[in-house]
Amino acid sequence: MISISKRWRIRQTPNRRSPQLQRDSFPTAAQWTAPMIPKPYRQMHDQFPEYMQAYEAFAAAAAKSGPLDAKSVALTKLAISIGAGLEGGTHSHARKALEAGCLPDELRHVAMLSAPTIGFPTMMRARMWVEDVLTKAAAKESTETQQP
C-alpha cells in the first residue's frame, strides 16, 4: 500500500501565510484543518482509511502522470468541477488552487472561461462558488494578519 503522507511536502510560500502544496505531496490527516477539508471527507477517511488512501494514491498518480505543474493541475480540476456543475467540487478545487499558489484572478478567469461552453447563467453560478471560497480565504488571511 502506498503511504500518502510520505510523498507530500508542504512549504511556506513567500508573502502568504498558508502553506503551498507541492506537486508530489498530499497532506496527512494531521495537516488537515477543519475549514480546509470538509467534515464528511474527514469522516470517510476515519471510517474507511484504506479505501481513502487508495483513492488519494490514484488522484496523486493522475496528477503526476503528465507534464502539468501543480498550478495547472489545480486550475484544470477547478475547470472540470465547474463544467460538471459540482458546487462542492468547485469549492474544494478553488481552495486547492489557492494552496497551489494560484491567484484569485486566475480562479475567476477559469470560471469566466466556462461561459461559452456551459452558458452564461451557469458560469455566473460557478463564479459565485469561486467567490465564496475567495471571500472566506480573504477573511481568514485578514484574521491571521491581525493576530499578534
Image (cartoon, rainbow, N blue to C red):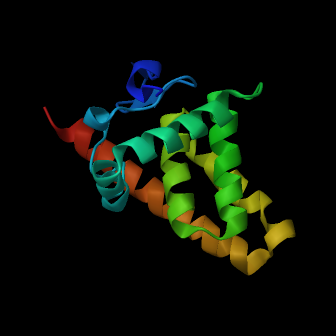
Image quarter of residue 67 = top right
Picture residue at 77% right of the left edge, 76% below the top = 120
43 or 100, which lies in front? 43
127 or 36, which lies in front? 36
Residue 14: x percent and y percent?
A: 44, 20
Instruction: Report the side of 99 relative to 17 (left or right).
Output: right
Which residue is farthest bottom? 121
Picture residue at 36% right of the left edge, 50% below the top = 37
- Residue 10 at least partly seen: yes
Residue 68: x percent and y percent?
A: 74, 29
Q: Is residue 12 above or below residue 42?
A: above
Which residue is farthest right? 116
Q: Is residue 25 above or below residue 104?
A: above
146 or 14, which lies in front? 14
Residue 22: x percent and y percent?
A: 52, 24
- Residue 102 at least partly seen: no
Q: Is residue 34 above or below residue 90?
A: above
